[in-house]
């Protein structure tokens, strides 16, 4: 009986073990699920930043959480342990010494400066909802939209439309079998006020991508006072609300690029010339750079994040003053004797001289060959003539005249400009030689008195600006409400 009983008891005991294991496994699984759900609830979509080195979690790896919401990266934690273990002092004895107080983590609360948050990069494969190949506007549609805002510059608009279309096809496809498509960075050359910045702004608004407009004059070689070269990428990151993935599809426009040309006669170190061009090579080509978040320069108090410039479109622009002389010198090197000879003053009054620019001319101006090689698309913008200035006043969607007409319409007053008045404004703008920017300054000057006087009298219904008023020999035509015959107001 005893042997049999023992066998039966053992069988019952053995039969209960798998059930208990299953229950324990189920409980542990529930705990893991709860922990995962809690972690998802706590995750606000932003990366943790190390309290000591200020690097984000994507760079350092898994953070170590300490009390009072303090996070430390493994590298800094290891360095702290190494420093403590190699210290000649016996910390164990010091713990019991009266008057010695060690670091209290609760004291650190509120000491950490509030840093810019960095959005986490999504783990899932990259998707381009805005940049689907089927949704990318065709070059003729891009040019048509540019035509609504920019007058003239047909060649420049066509070149930009094709280059941008090809670039974003490259970004959207990411790869095309074994054929890797190169970036179509651009260099635009044109006199001041010809619409370089305005073209880029209109383009970014049309494509709905982040745009950073920066100035090359503030860039200096690393280690000198001024903006670091990576600051152009950090401005794009700020324009994309610190979303790295969105910033990597943006456009960077670097204006005044001619100011970083090599200095021909300089006895001192050229910290904002050739060295800046060389530092920008890696950005133009496409590389991963660590950029500060929310600042222009790297320092200990600013977190860093990594941005890949492979799919960022760089557009450089500059006036390149006096480059016409270099072009003229090259063109006049042809023989002055024989059947193919040309007169010395053939190119003296050539209005399209700038369009004949070559890479060799730019190299002679002071741009290094490696820099120019990474800007394969080079095009020029024409200087504005009188006819184009009149069109700029009248035709674009947000033309200056339309802006003033809207301002006066809010006071229920109609504003008109005579054709002769527009020509007079254009002639004055040509004298200033600052392009379309001169138009605004001239109109502001003449509209000042009108904008000041009109709100005084509610009876004024219509104002017509005349050539005589622009030239200072007469006044605008004022028409009162319900009045059919205009009255001159000298």
Image (tube, rainbow, N blue to C red):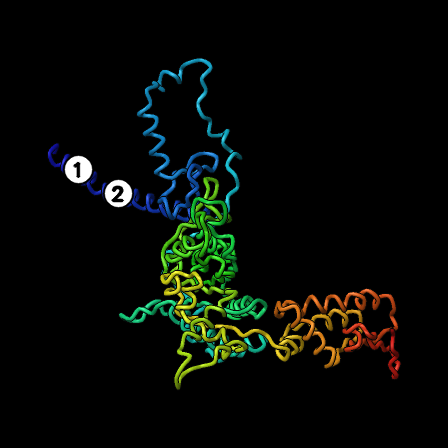
Q: Position of residue 317 (x, y in %)?
A: 49, 65
Query: From the viewer's perspective, is residue 36 above or below residue 199?
Result: above
Q: Position of residue 408 (x, y in %)?
A: 77, 70
On the rendered structure, is 135 left or right of 443? left
Query: From the viewer's perspective, is residue 395 above or below residue 7?
Result: below
Residue in the foreground of this view, choosing between 393 and 167: 393
Q: Can residue 402 be seen here?
A: no
Residue occupying image coordinates x 49% and y 49%: 227
The dot on residue 10 is: 1
Quarter of the image where one finds residue 183: bottom left
The dot on residue 21 is: 2
Q: Quadrant of the N terminus?
A: top left
Sort mark 2 into few (<14), some (14-19) or many (20+) by Cα contacts within 10 Å: few
Q: Position of residue 264 (x, y in %)?
A: 44, 57
Of the two numbered discs 1 and 2 in the rendering, the one whose residue sits closer to the viewer: 2
Residue in the foreground of this view, choosing between 42 and 426: 426
Residue in the foreground of this view, choosing between 217 and 180: 217
Q: Position of residue 222 (x, y in %)?
A: 42, 47
Residue at mark 1 to residue at mark 2: CA–CA distance? 17 Å
Q: Quadrant of the C terminus?
A: bottom right
Query: Callout 2: helix, strand or loop?
Result: helix
Q: Earlier in the sequence, mark 1 or mark 2?
A: 1
Q: Are marks 1 and 2 in contact (CB under 8 Å)?
A: no
On the rendered structure, is 473 left or right of 372? right
Q: Can residue 452 be seen here?
A: yes
The residue lying furthest to the top in this view is 98
Quarter of the image where one finds residue 369: bottom left
The dot on residue 371 is: none
Sort mark 1 into few (<14), some (14-19) or many (20+) by Cα contacts within 10 Å: few
């Amino acid at each position: 009986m005893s042997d049999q009983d023992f066998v039966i008891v053992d069988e019952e005991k053995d039969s209960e073990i798998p059930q208990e294991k299953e229950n324990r496994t189920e409980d542990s699984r529930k705990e893991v699920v709860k922990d995962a759900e809690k972690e998802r609830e706590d995750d606000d979509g932003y990366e943790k930043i190390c309290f000591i080195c200020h690097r984000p979690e994507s760079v350092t790896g898994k953070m170590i959480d300490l009390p009072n919401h303090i996070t430390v990266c493994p590298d800094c934690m290891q360095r702290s342990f190494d420093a403590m273990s190699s210290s000649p002092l016996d910390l164990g004895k010091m713990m019991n010494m009266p008057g010695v107080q060690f670091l209290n983590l609760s004291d650190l609360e509120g000491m950490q400066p509030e840093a810019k948050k960095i959005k986490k990069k999504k783990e899932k494969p990259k998707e381009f909802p805005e940049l689907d190949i089927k949704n990318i506007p065709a070059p003729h549609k891009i040019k048509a939209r540019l035509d609504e805002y920019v007058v003239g510059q047909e060649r420049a608009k066509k070149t930009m439309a094709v280059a941008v279309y090809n670039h974003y096809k490259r970004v959207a496809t990411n790869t095309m079998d074994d054929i890797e498509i190169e970036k179509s960075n651009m260099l635009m050359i044109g006199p001041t006020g010809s619409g370089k910045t305005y073209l880029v702004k209109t383009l970014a608004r049309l494509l709905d991508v982040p745009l950073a407009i920066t100035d090359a004059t503030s860039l200096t070689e690393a280690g000198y006072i001024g903006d670091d070269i990576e600051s152009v990428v950090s401005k794009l990151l700020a324009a994309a609300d610190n979303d790295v993935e969105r910033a990597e599809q943006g456009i960077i426009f670097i204006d005044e690029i001619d100011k970083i040309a090599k200095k021909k006669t300089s006895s001192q170190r050229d910290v904002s010339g050739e060295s800046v061009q060389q530092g920008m090579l890696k950005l133009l080509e496409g590389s991963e750079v660590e950029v500060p978040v929310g600042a222009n320069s790297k320092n200990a108090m600013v977190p860093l994040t990594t941005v890949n410039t492979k799919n960022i479109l760089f557009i450089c622009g500059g006036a390149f003053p006096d480059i016409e002389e270099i072009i003229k010198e090259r063109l006049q090197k042809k023989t002055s004797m024989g059947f193919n000879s040309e007169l010395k003053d053939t190119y003296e009054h050539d209005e399209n001289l700038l369009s004949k620019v070559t890479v060799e001319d730019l190299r002679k101006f002071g741009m290094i060959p490696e820099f120019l090689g990474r800007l394969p698309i080079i095009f020029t913008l024409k200087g504005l003539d009188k006819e184009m200035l009149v069109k700029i006043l009248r035709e674009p969607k947000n033309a200056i005249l339309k802006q003033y007409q809207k301002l006066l319409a809010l006071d229920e007053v109609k504003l008109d400009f005579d054709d002769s008045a527009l020509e007079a404004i254009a002639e004055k703008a040509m004298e200033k030689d600052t392009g379309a920017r001169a138009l605004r300054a001239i109109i502001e000057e003449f509209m000042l008195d009108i904008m000041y006087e009109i709100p005084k009298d509610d009876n004024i219904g219509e104002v017509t600006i005349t050539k005589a008023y622009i030239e200072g020999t007469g006044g605008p035509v004022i028409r009162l409400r319900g009045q059919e015959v205009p009255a001159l107001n000298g």
